[in-house]
Image (cartoon, grey):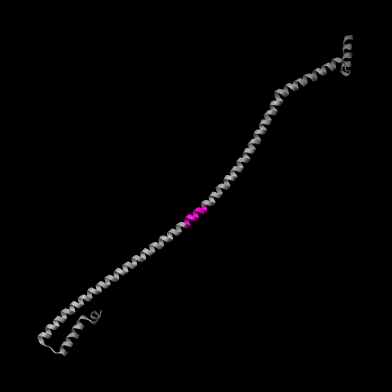
């Protein structure tokens, strides 16, 4: 029992008392923790920080790249919108030119039709004039033949002027005054 009592007493002193062994154990534990911290820091913390730094840099680069792409997309969008407006203007210009050409073609066709119509009218007038001339020639030939008949009758019967006048009047009535006057 005496031993147990002595061990208990010694433990009581050690727990509350600062002896050299406790200080040495505490210092050794602190040194082991510091060495462990250095080893872990070198093997874990530095790579983790490096990984996080690389990740942050990559994210920043991607954000900068996304902002650059967005700016480029906005620039391209504006460029395409400008081109679309220019294309719309060009389409309007082409349509206006086409309208002008169509109007010019319509005028040319109209003028050609007027010329053709004038040529047809002129040809019809010439044909009418030729027909009129032909009829006139026929009337003249008929009159010549009538006159020769009258001359034969006059010579044959030696008729007087009253009879001759009545024969001319009768012949004129047969031919018609309109034919004679035209």
Quadrant of the rendering where the C terminus is positioned: bottom left
Which residue occupies 64% across, 33% down? 58
Q: Is residue 21 above or below residue 94?
A: above
Task: Answer whether residue 92 is magenta in the image.
Answer: yes
Q: Is residue 181 above or below residue 44?
A: below
Residue 119: image x %, image y %? 32, 67
Residue located at (70% from left, 24% from top): 44
- Above/below status of 11 relative to 162: above
As drawn, is 50 to the left or to the right of 98? right
Q: Position of residue 135 (x, y in %)?
A: 22, 75
Residue 70: x percent and y percent?
A: 61, 42
Quarter of the image for residue 177 reads bottom left
Q: Is residue 35 magenta?
A: no
What residue do we see at 55% from left, 47% from top?
80
Q: Can the viewer see residue 1 in this picture?
A: no
Predominant secondary structure in magenta?
Answer: helix
Q: Nearer the viewer, residue 20 or 95?
A: 95
Q: What residue sits 41% from the left and 61% below the top?
A: 106
Instruction: Place residue 100 in its image quadrant.
Output: bottom left
Magenta segment boundaries in residue numbering: 88-96
Residue 60 appears in the figure: yes
Q: In the figure, 127 relative to 15: above or below?
A: below
Left or right of residue 13, residue 139 in this image: left
Task: Give the quarter of the figure containing the N terminus.
Answer: top right
In this picture, residue 103 sits left or right of residue 12: left
Can you give x and y, in whole percent of width and height, for residue 46 in the image?
A: 71, 26
Q: Which residue reaches farthest top?
A: 2
Asked which quadrant contains residue 53, the reply is top right
Count of picture labels:
0
């Amino acid at each position: 029992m005496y031993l147990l009592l002595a061990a208990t007493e010694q433990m009581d002193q050690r727990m509350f008392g600062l002896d050299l062994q406790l200080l040495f154990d505490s210092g050794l534990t602190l040194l082991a923790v510091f060495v462990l911290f250095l080893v872990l820091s070198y093997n874990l913390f530095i790579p983790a920080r490096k990984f996080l730094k690389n990740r942050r840099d990559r994210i920043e680069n991607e954000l900068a790249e996304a902002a650059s792409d967005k700016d480029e997309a906005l620039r391209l969008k504006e460029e395409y919108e400008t081109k679309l407006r220019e294309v719309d203007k060009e389409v309007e210009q082409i349509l206006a030119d086409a309208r002008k050409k169509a109007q010019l073609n319509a005028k040319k066709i109209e003028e050609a039709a007027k010329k053709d119509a004038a040529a047809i009218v002129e040809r019809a007038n010439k044909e009418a004039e030729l027909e009129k001339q032909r009829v006139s020639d026929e009337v003249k030939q008929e009159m010549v033949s009538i006159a020769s008949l009258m001359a034969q009758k006059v010579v044959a019967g030696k008729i007087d002027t009253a009879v001759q006048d009545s024969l001319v009047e009768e012949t004129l009535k047969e031919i018609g005054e309109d034919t004679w006057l035209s």
